[in-house]
Image (tube, grey):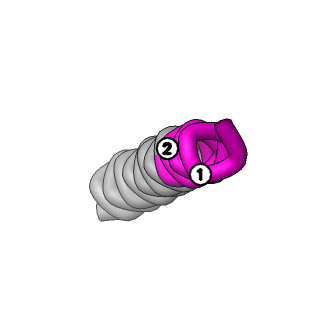
Amino acid sequence: MMQNYLTLRHLSINMSITCKRKYYFLKLIYHIITILSLFKFII
């Protein structure tokens, strides 16, 4: 039982890290697109 619990905990921690990374990546892409459109607007 304890082993099961530890595995589950490990999995959930991994999942949250992956989600954070995905979220960060999406934010980065969003910022790049915003900056590019701003440059187009200026030029």
Residue at figure coordinates x 29%, y 55% from the top left = 4
How would you classify the magenta stretch by its main secondary structure? helix
CA gap between label 2 and label 1 equals: 12 Å
The residue range painted magenta reads 30-43
**Residue at the disc numbered 2:** 33
**Pick the front one: 15 or 9:** 15
- Asked if one can make out residue 6 in the rendered structure from this viewpoint, the answer is no
Residue at figure coordinates x 29%, y 63% from the top left = 1
- 33 in magenta: yes
12 on left or right of 43: left
**Residue at the disc numbered 1:** 41
**Pick the front one: 41 or 30:** 41
SS of the residue under disc 2: helix
- Asked if one can make out residue 30 in the rendered structure from this viewpoint, the answer is yes
Quarter of the C terminus within the rendering: top right
SS of the residue under disc 1: helix
